[in-house]
Amino acid sequence: MKMARMVHNKGDLMNFGFVSTRFSGTDGVSLESRKWAEVLGRDGHRSFWFCGLCDHPAASSFVVPEAYFQHPVIDRINRAIWHCETFPEGVAAKIARCQGHLHAALDTFCDRFGIDLLILQNAVTIPMNLPLGLAVTDFIEGSGIAAIAHHHDFHWERDRFAGGAVQPFLRRAFPPVLPGIVHAVINSPAAREVKARFGINPAIVPNAMDFDRPLPGARLSPDAARASLGLAPGDRLILQPTRVVPRKGIEHAIELVHRLGESRNKLLISHEAGDEGLDYRNELAGLALEKGVDLRFVSDRVTGVDDRDNGLFSLEDLYLLADFVTFPSLYEGFGNALLEAIYFRKPVLVNRYSVFKEDIEPCGFRLVTMDGEITDELVGEVRHILENPESFKASAAANLEIAGKHFGYPMLEEQLREMVHAALRG
């Protein structure tokens, strides 16, 4: 699928400034941002990165520690502002100081790299860093710079982002309703909600992958790689390629492996617990022990960058090694792991979460699906695939073709071109 050349109003190549709390690792925002930058780069445009935690080259990055949501100052603000009707004394002043610092840093970033257009990646969507969202909003309003706000998940989707005291700040900047910002969401329900709340008609830009890219080569032989992960010859690798948070429904993956009933089936979870604490991780470890499931958390062995020295694996390495992928999420904004499994030609179990049913399932993929529970029929279907991997090859090829049509880079290129045009027109 050949990509059309991007055309914009300026007549020359552009410098795009990506802004978020972090661009590092394998979280969905970091991954999708890399894809957007890759598509822009194919046409010669350059991308630069403003954030608090970064794994991009230093020459194209502008790291401000206070932009990271786990910076001590931001952490103290977060501990004080949620679920209260009045801020504790001094908190508003602390927010203002941090906001001013980040505003000045954004000004320097845009000057240093000659930024033509900002791409806000969840920075004005979910208030992991309230001062950053406020600073971005004020900077755009004051400077008049063009911007695209890419929204992955909103604050009203999480119970923890509540409280009367913070509402004026959320109304101001999460998201900001300004004429200079073009908004994009990742699914149809979010588009309807944004329209209802703010009168904005956002673009719907689903997660994407370069499905035309050849599969990467294995860094190690499969046997050596599996041995490095502690797997014995004949073991099967069941991969759960998500963060360890309750909405991922990982207890269903444990139940599946338990009911498959073979000790050689090992369940590996690739990502860390993230920003929602360790309680769920501990619950899963206890459940796996109770069910006799060999559950392994391997995030300390997984790197999000190309450098895979010192015994580290990339997420791609794990997909190449996987015999089966589990994705039993209760809720997803879209579902990067599903696209990844399809790209790597792997069979995958999907819980039919709402966005899947509305935006993905109608495309006609051949997947193992569930409706909130592991049934005997489902276990039999998975067992058949594991015992007869050749039987899935035709489905893998069909899935790849469908995904390339609906969620490939040509789709993303077209969407980006239209949004850039709209943002530059103001």
Image: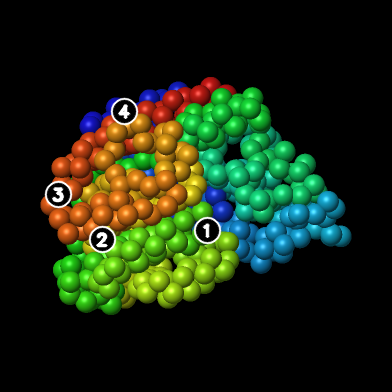
**Rendered image coloring scheme:** rainbow
Task: Name the residue nearer the viewer: 172 or 347.
Answer: 347
Instruction: Give the distance between the C-alpha atoms of the residues marked 1 and 2, in whole angstroms.
Output: 23 Å
Where is residue 185? Give x, y as percent.
51, 35
Eye-nearest disc, 4 or 1: 1
Q: Earlier in the sequence, mark 4 or mark 3?
A: 4
- Residue 269 visible at all: yes
For the residues marked 4 and 3, what is the alpha-carbon distance in whole angstroms?
39 Å
Of the two numbered discs 3 and 1 on the same chain, state the one appearing first in sequence: 1
Give the class, few, some or many, for how many residues have Cα within 10 Å of label 1's Cα (few <14, many ≥20). some
How many other residues sit within 10 Å of disc 4, few (<14), some (14-19) or many (≥20)? few
- Counting residues from the start of the chain, the first of labels 1 and 2 encountered is 1
Write down the residue under mark 1. 246
Placement of the C terminus among the 4 image quadrants: top right
Q: Nearer the viewer, mark 3 or mark 2?
A: 3
Q: Is residue 26 visible?
A: no
What amino acid is found at the position of numbered circle 4 in the picture?
Arg
Pointer 4 residue? 5
Is 73 in front, or is 264? 264
Question: Mark 3: which amino acid?
Answer: Ser
Q: Could you tell me how far apart the alpha carbons at marks 3 and 2 are, in whole angstroms?
A: 16 Å
Gap in Å between the C-alphas at discs 4 and 2? 36 Å
Dot 4 lies on which element?
A: loop
Query: For mark 3, what is the residue?
Result: 391
Label drawn at residue 322: 2
Q: Which of the two discs, 4 and 2, sits closer to the camera?
A: 2
| Crowd tier of the residue under label 2, counting other residues whose Cα lies within 10 Å: few below 14, some 14–19, many 20 or above | many
Determine whether the residue tagged by mark 2 lies in a helix, strand or loop: loop
Residue at the far front in the pictured view: 376
